[in-house]
Image (tube, rainbow, N blue to C red):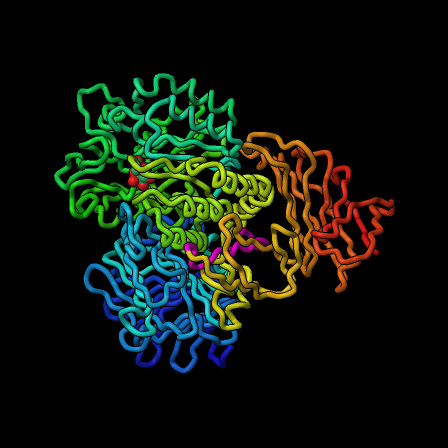
Amino acid sequence: MPKSTYLGLCASTLILGLIAASPVMAKSSDTYVLDKGHVHLEISAVRDDIVRIRMSEHKKARDESFAVSSEVRKAHLTLHVSTDHKLISLATSSLIVKLDPKTLAIRITDMQGQVLLADASGQAVRFDGQGFHMRKVMPQNAHYFGLGDKTGPLDRRDQAFSLWNTDNFGFGDYTDPLYKSIPFILGLDNTGKSFGLFMDNTWRSYFDFGKSERDTLNIGAEGGDIDYYVMTGKGPKDIISAYGYLTGHAPLTPEWALGFQQSHWSYMTQGEVKSIADTLRKDHIPADVLYMDIDYQDHNKPFSVNTQAFPDLKALVSDLKAQDLHLVLITDLHIAHAPNQQYKPYDSGEASDIFVKNPDGSDFVGKVWPGDAVFPDFSRKVARQWWGQQYKDFAKLGVGGFWNDMDEPSVFEVATKTMPLDVVHTIEDDGFTTRKASHAEMHNVYGMLNSRATYEGALVNTPNTRPFVLTRASYAGGQKYAATWTGDNSSTYAHLKLATYMLVNLGLSGFSYVGDDIGGFAGNQPSADLLTRWIEIGAFNPIFRDHYQKDKPAQEVWVNGPDHEAIRRRYIEERYRLMPYIYALAEENSRNGLPLMRPVFLSYPEVVAKGDHLGGTDDQFMLGDNLLIAPSSAPESPQAYDISLPSKGWYDYWTSQRLDEAAIKETPRLDHLPVFVRPGAILAKQPLVQSTMQTPSGPLEIHVYLGPDCQGHLYFDDGVSFDYKKGAYLRQNISCQSNAALDKVSLDFGPREGQYHAWWSQIRLIIHGYRGQSAHITQDGHALTGQWDVTNQTLSLDLADLAHQSHLEIKS
Ligand code: GLC
């Protein structure tokens, strides 16, 4: 720490003081308060590694948030206050905030004094009556990520974005704004230093990463106070988990939502839905979910059913269930404005007076799919509860999940594509004083509150079933309620590429259950090759849903003939084999917030330090820390391309071959998506099933890829209920050690935790990379025999299930 004068403040005592030529200050040990001119500033630390900075033009800024719970906001750590060369220094044990009391300029450093984030010189903060603008320094070696699924390159540097949830059908490669507003960014420089910045503001806002002003990050909003958090840590993973601490983790998904999902706007009849299910099963294409889009409804009226086209929804749900498929129904928020038409959602909503209002107190009416529609005021408790009840009948039928679309909210036939800014909402929420708020303030959280009402309703209607909600619009923290997708993309190679950047950035922004419309939603029919490549990559994305627009030629897996179908099937099958690994990642995410799909630098920040900011190209991504997926950055080109792995010794996932080099030249082949495994990975795989609802038959496969830091774990539960919270799960750590020659291996199975009963009685252990001439194997001192596959350099052995601690040794 720099040499400083410690002012010795006592806890919870508010001390007023003056320092030379400084404005009046009030200081306490857990919140630093300063008033200068018309600006009121408060600095606190909600955790050692997270500081919160609030500035407003009113003395009493409201302490409210839709993203950070009041419990988290209330936690204030002691700040050690000192002065250092006329700067006020506020320190936790992880970071120091340096404040110039004259200018209110702020610089945040780590304990070594290295700057994490600093205000730009000149005027760093400006209020303009309604909103504000801030300017921060962007070091030239820094890269910026986050903001959810924005278009453009993976790295936000030199781009500028608006945050205003917008329905943007058929968006282009650079269209902005889009459906979500997630004002969180991760900064990372090539010395490995990283920070996070979350600006908790729901108004229309912007982030300009040096586009309009060189090397300067400009951030502003049209309204509200300045309220932002800065996070630090050892590396980007710490930043992401600090952000998860602030805004919450996604609850563990039902496992079936990780299976293959088929959707279309729209399967028009019950028979058509059934025939899609039949073809999936006849063609042995593993799948878990079918979707029904707006046309199952009566004149697009939410919560109604067109009984001519869908005469027996109950029978359909149970037919699908018999085929191990879940049905997800679209349930848009715009309730048809249909007075005196026996349309219950309108009548009951109107009776409870839960729709958003025009300034004169009448219901706001706007056109969407059903024509004139009214809009529930999801920021009111009573409206959220009312919304949840609308699902009761569907829940009784056993419908698996719900899809909230158009919740930006989208309004047709108006230039703004949404409600007027003066539409009135009422906020009743945790930590809020109940008050009215304009649509200008509520717009960006409306979709999140819609999905929250759906999620909470599902918990009431089916308490021991994990809800699955898919939303298009959301705000920071929306991951607590719903999975999301990237909206109405197009069937182009550019959008296949873009999908990776969008999904990776969503993952870095708290949303881990993310997908795009496989094959592209809008535009022309995807070519057979494009759809095949999209399915290959989609097999390694968290949400894997083929969905396409009305009146477009069919886009299901089988549409381009048997050769394409065979390739696509193989990738979908591989995802199902990998399901134990993918599901374990989901469970981990529910505890630590780390995304399933990651940029390479999240697992290997040291590649950034080497000056290559992503290790290879932006198109490469990871599924967990163990699989690196490396599509070409020119996916339509036959030209060979370079893949650069984080180190030597990685394995080719498909051939098992151990790679001596980190740099690889790949010649594209339609049937091949390069996937690599981290040396030291231990992956669990299962025999092929056609749905996650089926119990695999055969041994659980445990694949050990010899290398440093060799470890993995098993996680299983019933995949659908909350019983895992009461102990009905299975967790087991596995580790291994090998010598440099890779001809001597020891493996340790830890004790098994939890009361979930394994579906397997046998384990097939497959060791990749073993280089011994022979293999003498012992398990807890007893000799075993294995099979040595010379071509693949794998050693396999079948064992009785290892429910207890066990030690294996293999040597030549
Ligand atoms: C929106 C959605 C799309 C859906 C369509 C009809 O465009 O983004 O996925 O199919 O509406 O509901």
Q: Residue sitting at 40 percent across and 26 percent down? A: 273
Residue toward you, 330 or 66: 330
Q: Quadrant of ligand 1?
A: top left
Give, as a single range, the part of the protein colored magenta.
621-636
Residue toward you, 805 or 115: 805
Q: Residue furthest left?
A: 360
Residue toward you, 452 or 519: 519
Magenta stretch: includes residue 624? yes
Residue toward you, 518 or 716: 518
Q: Quadrant of residue 548?
A: top left
- Position of the C terminus by quadrant: bottom right
Residue 622 as seen in the image, left or right of residue 412: right
Residue 681 as seen in the image, left or right of residue 239: right
Q: Is residue 599 above or below residue 461?
A: below
Residue 538 as seen in the image, left or right of residue 779: left
> How would you classify the magenta stretch by its main secondary structure?
loop
The picture places residue 807, in percent across and down from the top left corner, at 79, 49
Q: Residue sitting at 62 percent across and 34 percent down? A: 728
Q: Is residue 103 above or below residue 365?
A: below
The picture places residue 98, in percent across and down from the top left corner, at 41, 73
Residue 1 visible to the viewer: yes
Q: Quadrant of residue 208?
A: bottom left
Magenta stretch: includes residue 111? no
Q: Residue sitting at 33 percent across and 49 percent down? A: 180
The picture places residue 723, in percent across and down from the top left corner, at 57, 33
Q: Is residue 234 above or below residue 575?
A: below
